[in-house]
Image: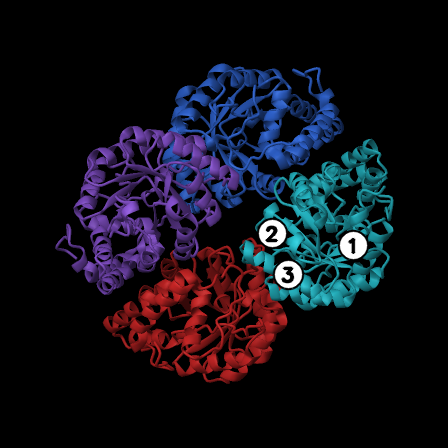
Chain colours: A cyan, B red, C purple, D blue
Amino acid sequence: MDQFEAARPYVGVFTIPPTPFLESGAIDEASLRRCLDFCVLAGAHGIVMGVNASEAITLTDEERMRVAEITIGHVGGRVPVVIGVSGVSTASSVQHAAHARAAGADSVMAMPPYVRHPPAGEIFEFFAAVAAAAEGIPVWIQDYAGPVGTPMSTALLTRIVTEIEGVEFVKEETAFAPQVITVLAGAAGDHARGVMGGMAGRYLMEEARRGACGTMPACEVTDAHVAVWNAIESGDEREARRLHTRLLPLLNYEAMYSFTIYKEVLVRRGVIASAKTRVPGAGRLDAENHRELDILLKDLAPLLTLGLRPDF
Amino acid sequence: MDQFEAARPYVGVFTIPPTPFLESGAIDEASLRRCLDFCVLAGAHGIVMGVNASEAITLTDEERMRVAEITIGHVGGRVPVVIGVSGVSTASSVQHAAHARAAGADSVMAMPPYVRHPPAGEIFEFFAAVAAAAEGIPVWIQDYAGPVGTPMSTALLTRIVTEIEGVEFVKEETAFAPQVITVLAGAAGDHARGVMGGMAGRYLMEEARRGACGTMPACEVTDAHVAVWNAIESGDEREARRLHTRLLPLLNYEAMYSFTIYKEVLVRRGVIASAKTRVPGAGRLDAENHRELDILLKDLAPLLTLGLRPDF
Amino acid sequence: MDQFEAARPYVGVFTIPPTPFLESGAIDEASLRRCLDFCVLAGAHGIVMGVNASEAITLTDEERMRVAEITIGHVGGRVPVVIGVSGVSTASSVQHAAHARAAGADSVMAMPPYVRHPPAGEIFEFFAAVAAAAEGIPVWIQDYAGPVGTPMSTALLTRIVTEIEGVEFVKEETAFAPQVITVLAGAAGDHARGVMGGMAGRYLMEEARRGACGTMPACEVTDAHVAVWNAIESGDEREARRLHTRLLPLLNYEAMYSFTIYKEVLVRRGVIASAKTRVPGAGRLDAENHRELDILLKDLAPLLTLGLRPDF
Amino acid sequence: MDQFEAARPYVGVFTIPPTPFLESGAIDEASLRRCLDFCVLAGAHGIVMGVNASEAITLTDEERMRVAEITIGHVGGRVPVVIGVSGVSTASSVQHAAHARAAGADSVMAMPPYVRHPPAGEIFEFFAAVAAAAEGIPVWIQDYAGPVGTPMSTALLTRIVTEIEGVEFVKEETAFAPQVITVLAGAAGDHARGVMGGMAGRYLMEEARRGACGTMPACEVTDAHVAVWNAIESGDEREARRLHTRLLPLLNYEAMYSFTIYKEVLVRRGVIASAKTRVPGAGRLDAENHRELDILLKDLAPLLTLGLRPDF
C-alpha cells in the first residue's frame, strides 16, 4: 500500500532553483537551464519555481513569466513543475496562475498577497480566484510566516481546501509547522491530497513521521535531500536520520545566510555562473563565510553525488 | 521674490488620482480619464500617479505602465506629472522609471523596495539606479512609514540628494514628518529643490510654515486642497487655516477608511463609475459610513467648487 | 428610556490622565493629583488610569501600583475609576488586577500581553485569569492595533464576553473600529454591557450613532470632550457635531505628536508641572510645534471652560 | 598568550537557566536552585539570568528581583553572574541594574526598551543611564533582532562602548551576527573587551574564529556546549567541530520550539520539576515532539556527561 497514493505525483523532494543573475543584474538564462538539469539529474521529484527561495518577489512580471516558461519548457515533463504565483494582489496572482497554466505548469502555489495582508474573508476569495485562473490544475496554499507570508488558521486552511475545488495541497511553514501538519491532517482529511514542509527540510524527519508527502527546499544540495527522502520512503528511518544529520550543518548555516549561500554553493558546484542576488538585505559573504563554507561542503561531499567538483 | 523658485514647477497641490476599477476588477480607463480631467479642472498644480493612494502595489506591471501612459497622454502637459516607480526590487523600479521617462513623465518618485526592506547602503545604490534610469528627469525620494515604506534618516536623505545627480525632491511622511522637513531643510540645503508633505495634507498648515513646497493628497477634494494652498501661497494664513479646518473632518474620516472613501467621494461627485478597490484589507463601507459621509460632504460642499452634484 | 441603561455608570467621557514626571524622571505625584482634580472638575464621567496614553508601559510595577492607589484614593468615588492592567504576561496582569481591585478600583481594563502576542486560545485563558483576579469588578477588553495591541476577531471578543463572567465591556480601537462596534453589538448582544471607542474621540460622532456608550481620550481637553458628549446624550447631534468639529484640529495634531502634546497642553493649562515623557521615541516639540499649538489652542479656547489661563 | 585576556573572566559558555514555574504558574525556587547547581557542575563558565531564554519579559518586577537574588546568592561566586536588566523603559532597566548591582551581580546586560523601540539618540542615553545605575560593574549591550530586540548599527554600538564608561561587552545576535562580530572588532577595537554570540551557539564555530569570547545559550545541555568551547579554546578545532555537529540536531530542534524544549530537556534530566512556560505563544509539545526528542537526546547522550538519567 502506498501511503502517498492520493498525493502522487507530488511526493518527495520538490526542489526550488534560484533565479540566477548575470553580474549586470539581468537573468542568466543559460545558468537557469543548467540548474534545472542539475535538479532533475540530482533526483528531484519535482521542481518549484517562482517562490521565495528563487527571489520571485524581486522579478518584474515579464521576468517571472519568462522564467516560468523556461522552467516548464526545459524540464519538459521529466518531473512535475509547480509554479509560484504569489503576488501583490489577487489580480497579480490571477495573471501569473493563468499564464502558468497556459505555459504548461503541472500545478501552481500561492501565498495571499504579500505587501498588504488580507483578512480571512478576503483570503478565501483570493484562493477561489487563483483556482479559477488555474482552470483545473491543482493549487497549493503556501502557509508562510510574516512579514512576507500571511499565516492562516487551520480552520481557514481546512475551509479553503474543502470548499474550493482545485485547491488540493498545502506547503506549511509557519511557527510550529510540524504540529500544524498533524492538526491539518485531522481537520482537512481527504480534502487535502498532501502537505509538504519547507524551512529547507530542517524538520523533515519529524514532518515525514507526521504524514508530510515531501519537502520543498532550495536546490543547491538536491542530491543530499533526495537521499534523505528516499531512505524515508523506503522505510529506513535510521539511515534517513543519519543522512539528515549529515546535511544539517549546511542547512543550519543557510538558516542565517540564505540566498547568498544557496547560490554560492551552486557556483562552487559549477551549476550557475554567479552568486549575485537581488533580494534587499540579502547581504554578502565575507572571507570567513567562505572559509566556513569550505569546511561544511568538504564534510558534506559524500552526499553531493552529482556534479561534485574536485576542488572541495 | 518667490520662496519656491528653486522648486518650480513642483509647487502646490500635486494630487493623486486613484486607479478606478470596473466591477469586474479590470481598470476602468474611461473613469481614469475623467478623473484626470477632474484633477486638472479642479486646479491641481500637478498630478502624481502610481503611488500608494492609487493602489499601485496591486497592479500588474503591464497595468501600471498602461496607467502611466494614459495619465501622461491625457494630461498632455497641462500640469506636471510625477509617476510613482516604487517596486519590489531595484530592477522593478528601474523598469518603471525607464518606462515613465520614455512615456514623457516630468519626474518620477520612489520608495525603496517595499516587500523586503534594504539597509542604508543598498538604499543609496537603489536611488542611484533609479536616477540613472530616469535619465535626467528629476527623481523624488518618498520617505514613508512602514510596513510599506522604509523610513530613512535625515543623514541618509541628505546624502542621497547631495551625491546622486537627478535626485532633487523629497516627499516626507514618516513619524513627525513636519519636524523632518525642518531638519532636512537645514541639512540638505540647496541640494533638495523642494520637499512636499503627504498624509492627505492633514499637517499642511504646519508643513507650509516649515518651507514645504506643496502637498500630495488623494484627489477626491482637489478643489478644496487647492483653495487652501492658494490662500497659503497668497500669504493669507488666516483664510488658509479657515479653509483647512473646514476640510479637516473629511481628511480625518479618510485617515481611517482611506481607499474606499477616496473612491466613494469621486463616485458621488460623478467622476468615476465605481468605488471598487483592490488593496487587501481596504474594507467596505457600511450604511453608517455612508450616512456619516453624507454629513461630511454636505458640510464641505461650499469648497467643492468643481463638479458638485445636486444630491449631497 | 435610557439607551445606555445597561452600561451605567460607564457612560460618557472616560478620560485618561497622563503619568506626570518631574524633570528628574520620577513621578510627579502633586501634578498627578492636580490632574485628577482637573479631570473631575472638567466633567469627566470617569477616569481611566494606567493605559497607553498614560505611558503605563514605561512604569515599574511599583510605580504603576502607586499611581493606581493615588488615582483611586484622590478621585475618592467622585466618578468611576478604570485601572489599566495590561502587562507583559498573564502573571503581570493578574498581579495588577488583584492590586487594583484591592485598592478600590471600580473596574479594570486589559489588552492581551503586549511584548509577545498570544494566539486566540491563550487570549481566552488570559481574560479568564484577569476576571478571576478582579474578583467581581467588571473587566474591559481593550481591542487595540499592533504593535502594542493584539487585534481580536469579533468572534473571539464575543466568545470572551459571553463565556467569561465579569468580562462586560470593550474598548474598541482597531482598524475600522466604528464598524467593529456595529458588528459586535449584533454578535455579543446583551453579553457586552457597553463598548467605548478610543483614538482620542476622533470618530466619536460615528461611534455614538453606532451605539458606543462613550469614549476614552487623553484628558488634556476633557472639558471639550465632555461638551461634545453631553450634546450627543441630550440628542442634539447638530450641536455635538459643531463642537466636535471645533475640537478636531487639536485631535488631528495629537494624532501625530501624541504624548508630548497631551502633556504640553496640560502644562499650558497649569495642571501639571512638566511635559517630560518616558515613552521611547515620543519625540520632542520644536519651535514650530509650539507656534502651531498656540494657534490651535487659541481657536479652541472657548471650549476649554475649565482652568483656562489668560496667556493663550 | 591569551587571546581572551581582556575579556576574562567573561570567556566561554555563559549559560542561561530558565525561570522554572510550578504547575500553578508561580516560580519554582527549588527547581531554580537545582538548575543553578546543574549549570555550574556542568562546567558553565558563567551564568546569565533574567534574559529572553529565561522568559524574563513575563515576570513581575518583584519576581525578577527575587530570581536575581536567588541566582547571585546560590551561585555564590563559583562563576560570574550576568543579570539581564532589559525593561520596558529606561526607568525599568535602571531599577533592575541598580538592584542587580546591590545584590552582588558581576555584570549586567540590556537591550534597549522592548515594547516601543527608541531611536538611536535615545539608545545612547539609555545605556548611559544603565551604566550609571550599574555603578562600576561592567555593562553588556545585547544587540538582538526584532520584534523584542532593537538592532543597532555597528557605528552606534562602537560609539556606545567607546564613549560610555562601563559599557564593555556586546552580545550579538542580529541578522548576520557573525559578520557583525568581525566588523565590530575592527571598529570598536579595545573599547569592547569582548563579544559573545547567541542563537543557542548554532554559529559558534564561525563566531569563535572571528574572535568571539564565548556564547550565551540556554542551559539544558550546558555540558555539551562546554565540551565544544573547551575544545575550541584548547585549539582543537576538529574536535570542537565534531562535538558541535553532534549537538546541532538538538539546537536545530530548539530553533523551532525554543522555551518548551529548553524546559522539557531539563525535566527529563531531573533538574527542574515542570516544563511549564509563561511566554505567550510558546506552544506545547505533542506526542510526536516527545518522540522526536527521545531520539535526539538518545543520540546526544554521550555528550550529556552530567546528570544523565537512565531512561533516555
Disc nearest the viewer among 3 and 2: 3
Whether residue D247 is visible to the viewer of this picture, yes or no, is: no
Q: Which residue bears the numbered disc 1?
A: A47
Q: CA distance from mark 1 to mark 2?
A: 21 Å
Q: Quadrant of the N terminus of chain B?
A: bottom left
Left or right: A69, with D260 as reference point: right
Q: Position of residue B131 (x, y in %)?
A: 56, 69
Residue at the image point whose x is 35% and y is 36% from the top: C59
- Residue sitting at 44 percent across and 26 percent down? D64
Q: Amino acid at mark 1?
A: Ile
Q: Is residue D270 above or below residue C181?
A: above
Label 3 and label 2 in one chain: yes
Answer with mark 3 or mark 2, whichever residue precedes in sequence: 3
Q: Nearer the viewer, residue D280 or A243?
A: D280
Residue of label 3 = A128
Secondary structure type for disc 1: strand
Please state which amino acid type lies under the numbered disc 3. Answer: Ala
Q: In the rendering, at what x and y percent does residue D273 appear? A: 56, 19
Q: Position of residue D12 (x, y in %)?
A: 61, 25
Q: Secondary structure at mark 3?
A: helix
Q: Is residue B112 above or below residue C13?
A: below
- Counting other residues with Cα less than 10 Å from the Cα at mark 3, is it few (<14), some (14-19), or many (20 or more)? many
- Callout 2 secondary element: loop
Looking at this view, is A108 or A154 the one in front?
A154
Indicate the position of residue B129 as horizontal and vertical percent values.
60, 65
Chain hosting mark 3: A
Q: Tell me the kind of residue under disc 2.
A: Gly
Which mark is on residue A149? 2
For the residue pair A226 and C105, the one nearer the viewer reads as C105
Q: Chain of mark 1?
A: A
**Which residue: 73% across, 63% down?**
A27
